[in-house]
Image (cartoon, helix red, strand yellow):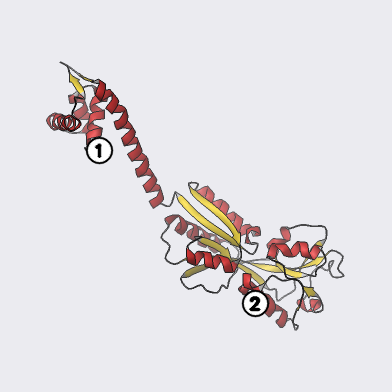
């Protein structure tokens, strides 16, 4: 039994006439009649009662009609599903977010635009840090990650810069410098800094240490924050001050002030990373949209 047998049978059942069914199907009547006889022989029962001017379904034929229609509907659904996957209109992407990247408007805008363009693709978010996300990419546990480049252990991965944002000084509201319009890093030489462990985002950590050295001092490091987003409440609690990406200033609390840095201003880049050997069309669309937004958006946000 082939799918064409089901289509032939349904056409005859609906037209109640071999001649009209043959015209509808675009074939000759004799071959159509032969195909139905073969189908009946295979099933071991008659599907139609042949009357003078029309045909009627037998009881077995009426039962088979419901099944035939259901089978063809399922085939069409499967065909549509495969085609949607092949066009990147369906599937899922497991996405990791590192180092408070989810606060960056360009990141959320990219997610929002992708979901609007490809609503059939399921996005599964996961929050972690850059180092663990690189491991997750390499092991296949996640498909794409928003990371803080440069990243280590990137063999087999592609990275693409999305946005660079300026860093801000985050200070306790009662700090003597919290009301300044802007500050040079050199003004912070005697302060105690709250940083995150280097292991969770080596690239950003090294950029910060380099910025301090270029300003003429080695930072006095205090208590470490478990992640970038944890720095703000620790400043509020009086553990020290820090530098944070501009987007983190969306975390508003009465006890913390954010002050711009005078040039040269350290940058906090955000990029996407994904495996070079990935074959997902849905993921390829995501990467292409990120590249499109990068080309049409600001290279650096201040």
The label on residue 3 is: 1
**Quadrant in which the N terminus is drawn:** top left
Q: Which residue, as the protein is rendered here, is positioned at the far bottom?
A: 216
Q: Please indicate, yes or no, whether residue 218 appears anywhere in the rendered image.
A: yes
Asked if the residue at tag 1 contacts the one at tag 2, i.e. Cβ–Cβ closer than 8 Å, the answer is no
Tag shown at residue 54: none
Q: Residue at x 29, y 32 (%)?
A: 68
- Say which mark, if any, is on residue 206: 2
Residue at x 72% of width, y 58% of height: 250
Figure quadrant of the C terminus: bottom right
User: Residue 33 placed where, x, y %?
Assistant: 15, 29
- Secondary structure at numbered mark 2: helix
- Can you see residue 161? no
- The image shows residue 206 at horizontal and vertical percentages of 65, 77
Hey, which residue is sitting farthest top in the picture? 52
Quarter of the figure with residue 238: bottom right
- The residue sitting at the front extreme is 44
User: Which of the two residues, 65 or 77, is positioned nearer the viewer here?
Assistant: 65
Q: Position of residue 155 (x, y in %)?
A: 48, 73
Element marked by disc 1: helix
Mark pair 2, 1: CA separation: 63 Å
Who is closer to the viewer here, 109 or 1? 1
| Residue depicted at 61% across the width and 62% down the height | 128
User: Nearest the camera: 227 or 283?
Assistant: 227
């Amino acid at each position: 039994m082939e799918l064409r047998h089901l289509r032939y049978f349904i056409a005859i059942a609906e037209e109640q006439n071999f001649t009209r069914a043959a015209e509808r199907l675009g074939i000759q009547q004799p071959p159509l009649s032969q195909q139905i006889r073969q189908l009946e022989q295979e099933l071991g029962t008659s599907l139609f009662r042949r009357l003078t001017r029309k045909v009627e379904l037998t009881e077995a034929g009426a039962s088979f009609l419901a099944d035939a229609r259901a089978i063809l509907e399922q085939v069409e659904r499967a065909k549509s599903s495969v085609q949607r996957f092949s066009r990147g209109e369906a599937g899922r992407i497991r996405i990791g977010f590192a180092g408070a990247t989810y606060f960056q408007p360009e990141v959320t805008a990219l997610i929002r635009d992708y979901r609007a363009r490809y609503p059939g693709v399921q996005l599964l978010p996961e929050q972690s840090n850059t180092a663990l996300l690189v491991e997750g990419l390499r092991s296949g546990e996640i498909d794409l990650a928003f990371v803080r480049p440069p990243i280590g252990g990137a063999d087999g991965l592609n990275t693409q810069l999305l946005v660079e944002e300026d860093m801000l000084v985050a200070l306790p509201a009662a700090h003597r410098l919290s009301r300044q319009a802007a500050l040079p890093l050199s003004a912070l030489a005697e302060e105690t800094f709250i940083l995150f462990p280097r292991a969770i985002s080596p690239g950003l950590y090294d950029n910060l240490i380099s910025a301090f050295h270029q300003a003429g001092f080695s930072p006095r490091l205090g208590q470490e924050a478990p992640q970038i987003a944890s720095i703000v409440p620790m400043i509020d609690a009086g553990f020290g001050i820090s530098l944070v990406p501009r987007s983190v200033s969306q975390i508003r609390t009465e006890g913390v002030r954010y002050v711009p840095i005078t040039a040269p201003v350290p940058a906090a880049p955000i990029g996407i990373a994904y495996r070079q050997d990935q074959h997902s069309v849905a993921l390829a669309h995501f990467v292409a949209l990120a590249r499109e937004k990068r080309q049409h958006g600001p290279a650096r946000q201040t």
